[in-house]
Image (spheres, grey):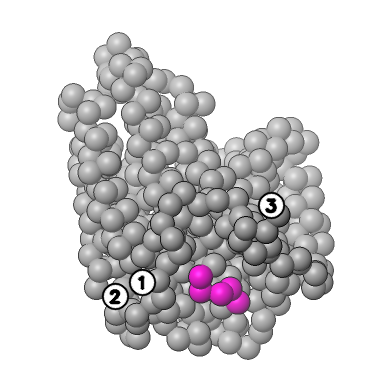
Amino acid sequence: MRRNACLFVLISLLSGLGSTAMTLAAGIWVLELTGSVALAALTGLCGYAPTLAAPWLGALVDRLPRRPLLVTVDAALGPLILTLLLVSPSDHPTTTLDLTEGSSPASVWLIYAVLLVRGLSYVLLDAGESAILPSALPESLLGDVNGWRSSAQEGAKIVAPLLGAGLYAWRGPIPVVLICAGLPLLTAACYAALHLPPLPAPERAGRPGHGEVRAGLRALFGNPAVRGPVLVAAAAIALSGLVNAATIGQVVHGLHLPPTRLGFLSTAQGAGSIVSGLLVGRLLARRSPTAVAALGTAVFAAACVSSSIRWWPALIAGSGLAGLGLVLTLIAGVTAVQTRTPDHLLGRVAATSNTVMFGPIAIAIPLGSALVHLGPTALFLTAAALAAAATLYRPRPVIVPPARPAGAQ
């Protein structure tokens, strides 16, 4: 079991490093090739958009052998990333922000295509990994290992800017692409090295139908022990997107500091996330996932209040508290899914819960950008009030009608 735990943490570290580095480099790359900030920002959307298809992809995970699926997806991801070498013929991209001296517009869209397929692969990987974790580890360790995995990912985000942005600035995109293409091959090897017990045969192969997707929805929303922490986590994560623009506004306009100070806030949030990942397992051993999710959302509300103060140390403290609270809510939701979902439904429920938790942020980010003209303080305090209200949510049992037998009219 210790071997499996170490492998899962290593997988999270490697995947977090590669994902963050590639996302950073892709945004800079598109900006230099097109000169458009808007087009560069769209690279981030490629990571969130595939979550909308998660319920169907999760049903597919439940139809296929899970470990071979994880190994195959990661093994295919490496060559996919290598196709980005076709974008630019030179070792260094243009720094003139002029398409005539860099790649053609058509080749820029290859970056979006690769990022979108990579986003789809991550949905499959997240669902498959969540589905095999309960069989690879005892239930008593799931909370701890999920926390350690989160700490590894957040730790990777602290180092990843050196790989993604730093190496890109020094040597251009090619070395970044080569490294990010090699990391999925290492995670594929880690999946292959896991010690797993014999698993029940997956459902019949083929295209997942609406009935299977509905079964996953029933397992998620019909069980209050799962529904509660997932919905609370969704609220906290969405509110973090709502204040994304407020954070920038507080630094640049509220405190009149250079935008480079945002890097310090990211580091503070990452540090808070690492601490949270190390603590969440102990909390889940003593409290229910619903209670831990509520605690994390309350901490995030306090983070918003702290960030609303026009004082640099308060903003640093707010970022650290945000990292602490958001990881508590996220791990509580993930652990509730893993420990309270039947094995044959784990893939689709894990994927659907990811859609529920991360889908709203795609709306919250542009909404926060539109509302930031009201002032960052007002936006932070509004988010704090909504987060405090979310902590009061207590799910009630619902009566879910059973699925009709096959062939029933």
Q: Which residue is mark 2?
A: 194
Amino acid at dot 1? Phe
Amino acid at dot 2? Leu
In this view, the residue in front, 99 or 275, is 99
The kind of secondary structure the magenta stretch mainly shows is loop
Q: Position of residue 229 (x, y in %)?
A: 67, 69
Marks 3 and 2, Cα distance to the nearest angstrom? 36 Å
Quarter of the N terminus within the rendering? bottom left
Left or right, residue 217 beside residue 71: right
| Span highlighted in magenta in the image | 340-344
> Please, is residue 110 above or below residue 256 in the view?
above
In what element is the residue under mark 3?
Answer: helix
Whether residue 282 appears in magenta in the rendering, the answer is no
Q: Which quadrant of the view contains residue 198?
A: bottom left
Left or right, residue 208 beside residue 386: left
In this view, the residue in front, 157 or 78, is 78
Marks 1 and 2, Cα distance to the nearest angstrom? 9 Å
Mark 1 near mark 2, Cβ–Cβ under 8 Å?
yes
For residue 334, say whether it is visible.
yes
User: Closer to us: mark 3 or mark 2?
Assistant: 2
> Please, is residue 388 above or below residue 366 in the view?
below
> Please, is residue 393 above or below residue 20 in the view?
below
User: Closer to us: mark 1 or mark 2?
Assistant: 2
